[in-house]
Amino acid sequence: MGILSFLLGLIIVLNIALGISIVFLERKDPTSSWAWLMVLLFIPVAGFFLYLIFGKPISKKRIFTWDNKSRLGVKTAVQAQLRALEDREFVFKHNGLDPYKDLIYLHLRNDDAIFSQNNHVEILTDGEEKFNTLILDMQRATDHIHMQYYIMRSDELGQRLAEVLIKKANEGVDVRVLYDAMGSRSLKKRFINRLKNAGVMVEAFFPSKFIVNFKINYRNHRKLTIIDGKIGYIGGFNVGDEYLGKKKKFGYWRDTHLRITGDAVQSMQTRFILDWNQASHEAVEYDDCYYNTHDSGDVGVQIVSSGPDSEWEQIKNGYIKMIMSAKKYIYIQTPYFIPDESLRDALRIAVLSGVDVKIMIPNKPDHPFVYWATLSNAGDLLNAGAEIFIYQNGFLHAKSIVVDGKIASVGTANIDVRSFRLNFEVNAFLYDSDLAEQMVEDFNKDIKLSTQMTKKLYEQRSLGIRFKESISRLISPVL
């Protein structure tokens, strides 16, 4: 009896101590704090271990480091652009960009995101097209291939990529492959060894070092490929057969990816090397061969990163700034729609101000709780006056926003708390009316393959769905 009393007392003390830590020391978002306090209250023992695995914040110390010489170049360019914007001396190639100089300024201050105006950008929305184009570019590589994906599978598509990577490594091309340990947990060891034995350098981001991986909740969700420092790929596609529409569960896979040439590739390269150096401890140095870009067009681009190690939620801040700049319309495509209060308020204010807000979400879940929370949040915006469309032609995985046919963003960040606070993400912010209008055309084509959620239909949802929405919304801050 004495031992049981002691253990019970110890559990209570640990719970109280952890609760105090959550509230007073870690300074979490209040909604997230309450969610974790409820977990500790109702499941005191298991909740303690769940928090250690899924709730404990990552160190705010910079986990990505860059040698002083190379970082100096970035800082110098950023400061020069900031001064030019402040002094109204910055020269835009397109007159229509002047209203968005504050968005450019935000990303420069918030994330050292250099603004380049000499890019060519190709939008890829079909998996076969994206990977066929990528493989063709990889086959032409002469110096290096840097590849990073959240999910990599050793299925048919994975094997296709592996063949090219191995061939290029045998030709003397430096090949580096970085995958997320959690996202690629099903990746077979023999697949990795086959790459390594052929000379491909392969690393996992935040791999398990113990029986329990205490960083499992912090995932590198970025998808980047840089070829010879000239060509960059960024967007939503991962490596797996489902992304080619070959999985019956999902059907056709609708996503958005970008192929970029121009100076924006330099920012993508820096992002990859920072991630690679953290995972591999190789300490890749600055080298001209990694930054071999050239003028390719006149599209303005900023590459913006965010992650749990950052003080600011850079990509979310960019989304909000875009939303608040809208005069005519905002079109959003996202597989998960779980905005925090700030982004939800921004969208609600836009709707109530007469801005046409259209949001497109998938018709099926790949993560059930996230899906029901998405429906609940979509219902809120529907009641405010937004138009909600449910994509019916397979699975919608695109992460894009376009405003007024002038600016847009495409990348890896979903509209959810996980992308804003827990995942390492990267987005391309695009300043070009032709590209934005192309994305609007793609959105309108997708509307024809979607059904519109009306207030009447939403109010007719079953009691079971309402219950799932309520539970999912309650736990959404810790999903």
Image (spheres, rainbow, N blue to C red):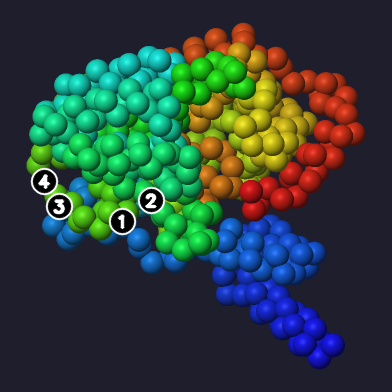
> Do callouts 4 and 1 mark residues in contact (Cβ within 8 Å)?
no
Check if mark 1's residue and mark 3's residue have beta carbons within 8 Å: no
- Disc nearer the start of the sequence (3/2): 2
- Disc 1 to disc 2, how far (Cα)? 8 Å
Residue 365 at x, y = what percent? Answer: 66, 30
| Mark with earlier residue (1, 2) | 2
Give me the C-alpha separation between circle 3 and circle 2: 19 Å
Q: Amino acid at mark 1?
A: Gln
Tell me the SS state at disc 4: loop
Answer with mark 4 or mark 1, whichever residue precedes in sequence.
1
Whole-angstrom CA distance, mark 1 to mark 3, is 13 Å
Helix, strand or loop under label 3:
loop
Q: Along the line of sight, which residue is nearer the eye, 277 or 194?
A: 194
Q: Amino acid at mark 4?
A: Asp
Rounded to the nearest angstrom, the CA distance separating label 4 from label 1 is 18 Å
Work out whether 247 lies above or below 422.
Answer: above
Q: Which mark is residue 278?
A: 1
Callout 1 touching callout 2 (CB < 8 Å): yes
Residue 180, given in percent of the width and then of the height, sits at 42, 45
Residue 432 visible here:
no
Label ID, residue 309: none
Q: Nearer the viewer, residue 47 or 333?
A: 47
Q: Position of residue 360 (x, y in %)?
A: 62, 24
**Residue under label 3:** 285
Residue matched to label 2: 205
**How much space separates mark 2 and mark 4, taking CA atoms?**
23 Å
Q: Which amino acid is tagged 3?
A: Glu
Q: Which residue is mark 4?
A: 287
